[in-house]
Image (cartoon, rainbow, N blue to C red):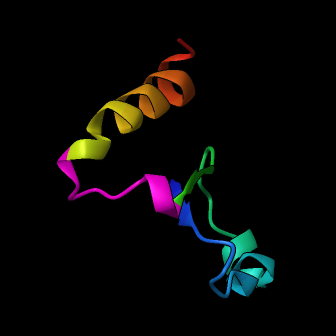
Amino acid sequence: MIISKDSEMDNSYQNSEIYKSIPAVKVYEANAEEFYFNDSLKLKYQRSFFKKHFLGK
């Protein structure tokens, strides 16, 4: 699971029992300001993020 996290937003859901009980194998946090899925200029950064976190490269 990838979370697009912004420090200026309410992230209190991460402390909830429901969130903590999600059976995800791993949770990766991405900076919301650098990780727009519809921004073609951010694709290189996103590719690097995925390679690092998913492939360990």
Per the rendered image, the range of residues in magenta is 32-40
Looking at the rendering, which quadrant does residue 51 occupy? top left
Question: Which one is nearer the viewer's eye here, 14 or 24?
Answer: 14
Does the magenta segment cover residue 37?
A: yes
- Where residue 6 appears, as percent x and y from the top left, is 60, 71
Does the magenta segment cover residue 30?
A: no
- Where residue 33 appears, as percent x and y from the top left, is 49, 61
Identified at 54% across, 23% down, the residue is: 52
Identified at 23% across, 55% down, the residue is: 39
Question: Which one is nearer the viewer's eye here, 38 or 2?
Answer: 38
Identified at 81% across, 79% down, the residue is: 15
- Where residue 41 appears, as percent x and y from the top left, is 24, 44
In the depicted structure, whether residue 45 falls above or below residue 55: below
- Where residue 18 appears, as percent x and y from the top left, is 68, 82
- Outermost residue, front direction? 41
In the depicted structure, whether residue 5 falls above or below residue 37: below
